[in-house]
Image: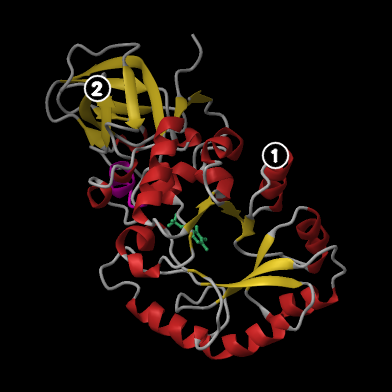
Amino acid sequence: MTRPAKVELDLGALRNNLQVVRKAAPAARVWSVVKANAYGHGLAHVWSTMRATDGFAMLNIEEAILLREAGWKGPVLMLEGFFSADELPLFDQYRLTTSVHSNWQLKALAEARLKAPLDIYLKINSGMNRLGFAPSRVAVIYQQLRRISNVGEITLMAHFADADKPDGVDQAMTRIELAAGEIDAPRSLANSAATLWHPHTQHQWVRPGIILYGASPSGNWQDIANTGLKPVMTFNSAIIGVQNLMPGERVGYGSRFQAPREMRIGIVAAGYADGYPRCAPDSTPVAVEGVMSGTVGMVSMDMLAVDLTPCPQAGIGSPVELWGNLVKIDAVAQAAGTVGYELMCAKAPRVPVVVKH
Ligand SMILES: *Cc1c(COP(=O)(O)O)cnc(C)c1O
């Protein structure tokens, strides 16, 4: 038997989730965000299932080239644009839409020798203070871009810091309106949270990421429980050892967990080197043979321990779901003090992927 840790990708769920986005934003076109190797799912595994999308958004040029060489002819948006002027010939060759967020990029665009103009996403700093132009400068930048012959269509772009909160887009929208002023250009503002919860931000193009993969932008599964979204990634393994503990006996590095009574525990072939969070506390949810239980003790590099009390029939070989349909990735992330995004992206290369079509 090979090591049982594996990730299963449910491409049916991915198709379903794209439909959920279409229903949520019926008038908008959809950039499917596939940065970070499609949030850890593997761009090569998922992109053809997502070809019903209107475009793909990412930030590594290698991922954009992979899509073009696989035959994707539709729009490709580079969310952080070109990182240096010498990338522009590739943007030209592969026909990539580029975000423009800094002054030096205007100069680089003006001086480049391109076969044809590139479409531009002009990035407004809506208050997050990562990338983008201050609202008061946007009109001038827009006029400068319009005069560059290498610049094709210009779309106004912004990104929300707090779209998972009820009033979370209000201040940003004020800044965006101020920036947009009289500019007559399409807009792309909404991430997953804004697409679901602030439909007035949808405009011409939405940019969902996390909801395509079936996790919650807020970090709380309950917030998307009624949307019809389904988890795409399941992280499974199995029990490879069993221990019977006497009261007071301890488990794992640092002896963090101490058995309060006699108990059976199972040792699961999955650890932080597979992408399971090391900081997961005792009682982080897991499912053993489909029965909910919790972890005990510190997560090791290659193993973790689970309480077998709720499932006395379980033993060596019993399947364990670390996250997926029963154990929501959001619940594991919440226990570990992070978000589903980080757990997906942390899926280690050593974990084999099984694709369910
Ligand atoms: C990652 C990202 C998105 C998608 O965010 P989600 O919260 O996953 O929907 C959209 N726009 C930009 C600029 C991003 O960096």
Where is mark 2, residue-wise?
A: 290
Q: Is 334 part of what is drawn in magenta?
A: yes
For the residue pair 347 and 252, the one nearer the viewer reads as 347
Residue type (three-letter) at the residue carrying disc 1? Gly
Residue 259 rendering spot, x and y as whole percentages: 18, 29
Q: Residue at x 23, y 37 (%)?
A: 283
Q: Is residue 269 above or below residue 139?
A: above
Q: Callout 2 environment at 10 Å: few (<14), some (14 to 19), or many (20+)?
A: some
Mark 2 or 1: the one toward you: 1
The image quarter in which residue 350 lies:
top right
Residue 98 rendering spot, x and y as whole percentages: 67, 65
Q: Callout 1 environment at 10 Å: few (<14), some (14 to 19), or many (20+)?
A: few
Q: Is residue 88 left or right of residue 182?
A: right
For the residue pair 249 and 348, the one nearer the viewer reads as 348
Residue type (three-letter) at the residue carrying disc 2? Gly
Magenta span of residues: 331-339
Q: Residue at x 54, y 85 (%)?
A: 134
Separation of marks 2 and 1 at Cα, in angstroms:
40 Å
Q: Is residue 41 left or right of residue 120?
A: left
Q: Is 131 part of what is drawn in magenta?
A: no
The image quarter in which residue 171 lies:
bottom left
The image quarter in which residue 195 lies:
bottom left
Q: Report the disc number at residue 71.
A: 1
Q: In the rendered structure, which disc, 2 or 1, sits on the residue that comes first in sequence?
A: 1
Would you say residue 278 is visible in this rendering?
no
